[in-house]
Amino acid sequence: MGLHIDHISLASPNIFRSADTLRKETGLGYWTGEWIRDTAVHIVPLGPPGNFIEISGFIDVHTLKTMDEHKQWIMDITETGDHFNGLCLGVDSMEELEQFAKHFKSIINLANDPNPATHFQRANGYILPMASTPSYSERSPWMKGLPNVYFYPDRTHHSSGQPVHASENMVRPTGIKWVEYGGTEAEMAKWLGIPNPGEVLKMKFNGKSLGLWAVCVGAEGKEDIVIRRPAASDAVPVSKYAD
Amino acid sequence: MAAVLDHIHMGSANVYTSSFKMMNEMKIGYYDGGFMSSITVGHRAFPLGGGNYIEVEALIDPFATTDEAKWPWWYKKALQAKTEVFSGLCLRVDTMEELRDIAKRHGGIVNTRPASRIRPDGPQVVSFSAPGGPNVRNPWETGMPNWYCFEDRLYCHPSGQPCVPAYGLVEPKGVAWLEMGGTEENMAKWLGQPPSTLNMRFNGKANGLYAIGINTDVGVVELRRPAATQDSF
């Protein structure tokens, strides 16, 4: 596949309500049960070649008594509702991921990191191994409205391929057709180190603040679905997190 | 007709960690029950067989719950106990007429707002409970059971829903026994039926539920947690 869109993060003040709302709005089903520490995700598969939206939010309210910069960012961008807060790209090999780590002047978060605090766990205990870059030890590029990159050593349990809660009037998604992104293609090209991200990643650029603003998903036998939410940078300017 | 056990409510600080921990401990499966219509509470259910289930609940919305005074009492108890707690024992009757009779016997009414939950697949789960009303203290807070009626909706009862597939699970076959605080005499008076019909045992501690035994295909599985009625843990 080469460099591609893997998944999209939608930050939510209440993942249960947001997933229910999105399903009613689009007919897209979702599955539940994955969590890490105080945060959980409801997953909306978008179809081939393996795309999904993760609706993410805090589910352990008491832990918010102890805040850090990242937690505060999530609270700030969800205070006024759902915001797209992450675009997650995928590559086919560790070699490609290493190239991105080198370009980002960072390191790789290993798929087999023994620290359980780095892994999302599913309701049955399964942990999907995934490697990514830039490093989690650095400020997330999401806070600057920029994507990060993932590699799955084994895609057979990929989040986009799991069964959703069956519901009435569901549609079958056929994959991402395009995404609408803030900023310019030149800014994205510089961040990723590739000449034509618009073409490679089916990105349209709207010139607004950096971050994802909309995603278009094909639907079998139906019109395309456009999911439009404000980018996180609409709530908290990326300049707050400039290096 | 005598009431039967319907479900057991457990308060938790984190429904994800609690339900995963309990699944590993009991080897009994669970599923995502969605969220309460109040939007602030997430739900997990463990079907136990025999028309019984455990529900685990916790606050899941940081913005809807900024006023700690409005946190559910059982949530505060789970935080205090640093583990999930047994916070409600819930019986079931077949008809609203029986539910009204029970409410009347306890000097209350059937709660006018039904318990309502939105499942991840869309439909609402609705049941009515008693006793309620201004003259009746919440029975859960006193460690005593209350009663529910699902009217004609038992066909989609929470105890009959499919669980998350996981390795090494046992097959639950209904609740074998309940370890209760208080005395058999007081419980019989509250229930209006012999506690033995609900397989209750009494440990003489403060009112509340302390442990349950669950019949399974490999024997009785025991789940023991603090009763939420305790002042300290």
Image (cartoon, rainbow, N blue to C red):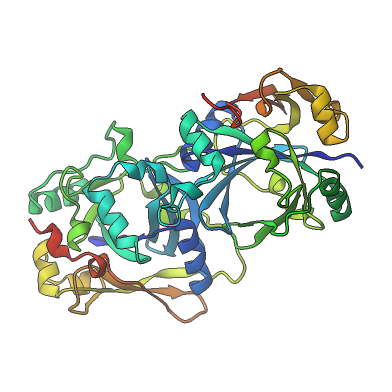
Q: Residue furthest top?
A: B203
- Whether residue A92 appears in this view of the structure is no
Residue at the location (46% across, 35% down)?
Answer: B79
Seen from this angle, which residue lies furthest right?
B1
Residue B67 in sight in this render:
yes
**In terms of depth relative to the viewer, which is nearer, A103 or B15?**
B15
Tell which residue pokes out farthest to the bottom in this image. A223
* Residue B177: quadrant of the picture: top right
Q: List x then y, in percent, for residue A164.
A: 53, 57
Q: Is residue A194 above or below residue A223?
A: above
Callout count: 0
Q: Height in image: A73 above or below B188?
A: below
Q: Position of residue B205 (x, y in %)?
A: 67, 19
Camera-nearest residue between A152 and A107: A107
* Coordinates of residue A107 in the picture (x, y in percent): 13, 44
Residue at the (49%, 73%) spot, across then down = A26
| Picture layout, residue A71 above or below residue B223 | below
In front of the other: A44 or A70: A70
Q: Is residue B61 left or right of residue B136?
A: left
- In this view, the residue farthest toward the front is B135
The answer to whether A122 appears left or right of B189 in the picture is left
At 70% from the left and 23% from the top, the residue drawn is B181
Q: Residue at x 65, y 23 (%)?
A: B222
From what the image shows, is residue B206 above or below residue A216?
above
Image quarter hosting the N terminus of chain B: top right
Q: Position of residue B217 (x, y in %)?
A: 71, 27
The residue nearer to you, when weighing B2 against A169, is B2
